[in-house]
Image: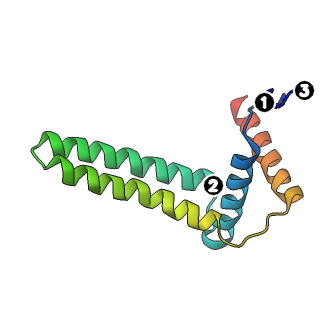
Amino acid sequence: MSADTPPSNRWYCPDSVREHNQKLGCVLQRRWNMSLRVYKSIKALTELTTVAVVGFAISAGADPTISVIIAGAIVLGWEAVEALVADSDVSVDPEAAEAIVNAIDEATDQEDD
């Protein structure tokens, strides 16, 4: 198998992204008792709401420069929190992380049926 050929997983995801998400999920679960899925949902909803509010504010006559700066601060704030949390000193047990991923995949497969 060449380096460019993804493995025959159901969904291909680079190892660095998987490791980042596993680490972030472990930290979120330990610190705030929140799953990665809930965190990503809140993050996405916040970003979409921010863009919608800024679009409405600009159409209502707000200064576009200030509006975009505020929106950028909100969106980048979430990215900064994620980077700080994921880069904190946390060791992830690969076997435990794989078991969690498999359990989530099985639950997702059962929901799809």
Kindly indicate the quadrant of the structure image that contains residue 29: bottom right
Q: Where does residue 88 sit, x and y in percent of width and height?
A: 65, 71
Please, what secondary structure does the residue beneath circle 1 have? loop
Residue of label 2: 36
Whichever of labels 2 and 1 marks the residue nearer the N terminus, that label is 1
The answer to which of 80 and 61 lies nearer the viewer is 80
Residue of label 1: 10
Q: The residue under label 1 is which amino acid type?
A: Arg
Q: Where does residue 3 sit, x and y in percent of width and height?
A: 83, 31
Please, what secondary structure does the residue beneath circle 2 have? helix
Please determine whether, in this image, residue 73 is positioned above or below residue 6.
below
Q: Where does residue 91 sit, x and y in percent of width and height?
A: 79, 68
Question: Would you say the residues marked 2 and 3 are in contact, meaning their CB atoms lie under 8 Å apart?
Answer: no
Q: Residue at x 73, y 70 (%)?
A: 90
Q: Residue at x 72, y 49 (%)?
A: 16
In the drawing, does residue 88 fall left or right of residue 61?
Answer: right
The label number, if any, that marks residue 1 in the structure image: 3
In the drawing, does residue 38 fall left or right of residue 99?
Answer: left
The label number, if any, that marks residue 85 in the structure image: none
Q: The residue under label 2 is which amino acid type?
A: Leu
Indicate the quadrant containing the N terminus: top left, top right, bottom left or bottom right.
top right
Number of callouts in the render? 3
